[in-house]
Image: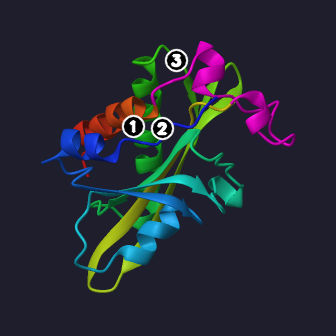
Amino acid sequence: MRECPLRLEEMRKVMLGRLIGREIQLLDTTRSTNDAIFDRITNETAAGIVVFAETQTAGRGQRGNVWESAVGKGLWFSVLLRPQMTLTDSVQLTSWAAVTVRESLLQFGIEAITKAPNDILVRDKKVAGVLVEMRAQPKAQHIAILGIGINVNQSPQDFSGAIRDRATSLAIIRGCEIDRTAVAISLLGRLNDSYRW
């Protein structure tokens, strides 16, 4: 399927005035979007910043697993949060984000399930995943980086042989190309509206 760049200005306009999405950046490439946020923040950086990348060279999932990020085919992004919780309670953020991704996909005709702690599956194949990384901050509120990866427009050949039988995409499921920006806007809105920490 062809690559269609994310429409950054459209996302910014829709999320204007909200917490999550108060600032949205789009990188052509990065090691991982979680790392990109960690590299940009200080103790004064406000929660709600979102960083998207068209591809990641070292995307990661739970337990150090590699996350494949085909150029321009999926949604790879991270959100800076400053939750009122202890480091050990980060599982609550993971569960909330996974459920929110699943609910957002319903808008696009995708009926998925969540597999604890962080996978979103359709017919036993992974279509999305969540990674929350929390870090204590000296004399400041803890930070949490919420990373989300969604396979949107990949065809089977976009996945390596190692995961091809375990991965799928929205386009494979629906049989047509999906508007990545529309998926991003829907998900950011749901994340913002349901965030409680």
- Look at the image and say whether residue 92 sits in the magenta stretch: no
Report, in whole angstroms, how far the alpha carbon at label 2 lies from the one at label 3: 14 Å
Name which quarter of the figure residue 83 lies in.
bottom left
Residue 88's x, y, as percent?
Answer: 46, 62
Residue at the left extreme?
Answer: 17
> Left or right: where does residue 44 sit relative to residue 133?
left
The nearer-to-camera label among 1 and 3 is 1
Q: Which quadrant of the rendered structure holds the N terminus?
A: top right
Mark 1 residue type: Ala
Looking at the picture, does residue 160 appear above or below residue 190? below
The nearer-to-camera label among 2 and 3 is 3
- Disc 2 is placed on an element classified as helix
Residue at the right extreme?
Answer: 161
Q: Residue at x 35, y 68 (%)?
A: 143
Around disc 3, counting alpha carbons within 10 Å, would you say few (fewer than 14), some (14 to 19), or many (20 or more)? some
The nearer-to-camera label among 1 and 2 is 1
Q: Earlier in the sequence, mark 1 or mark 3?
A: 3
- Look at the image and say whether residue 164 sits in the magenta stretch: yes
Magenta extent: 155-179
Around disc 1, counting alpha carbons within 10 Å, would you say few (fewer than 14), some (14 to 19), or many (20 or more)? many
Q: Which label is found at residue 98?
A: 2
Mark 3 residue type: Ile
Report, in whole angstroms, how far the alpha carbon at label 1 lies from the one at label 2: 14 Å
Q: Earlier in the sequence, mark 2 or mark 3?
A: 2
Q: Main secondary structure of the magenta part?
A: loop
Around disc 2, counting alpha carbons within 10 Å, would you say few (fewer than 14), some (14 to 19), or many (20 or more)? many
**Residue behind mark 3:** 110
**Residue behind mark 1:** 184
Q: Residue at x 66, y 21 (%)?
A: 172
Marks 2 and 3 in Cβ contact (< 8 Å): no
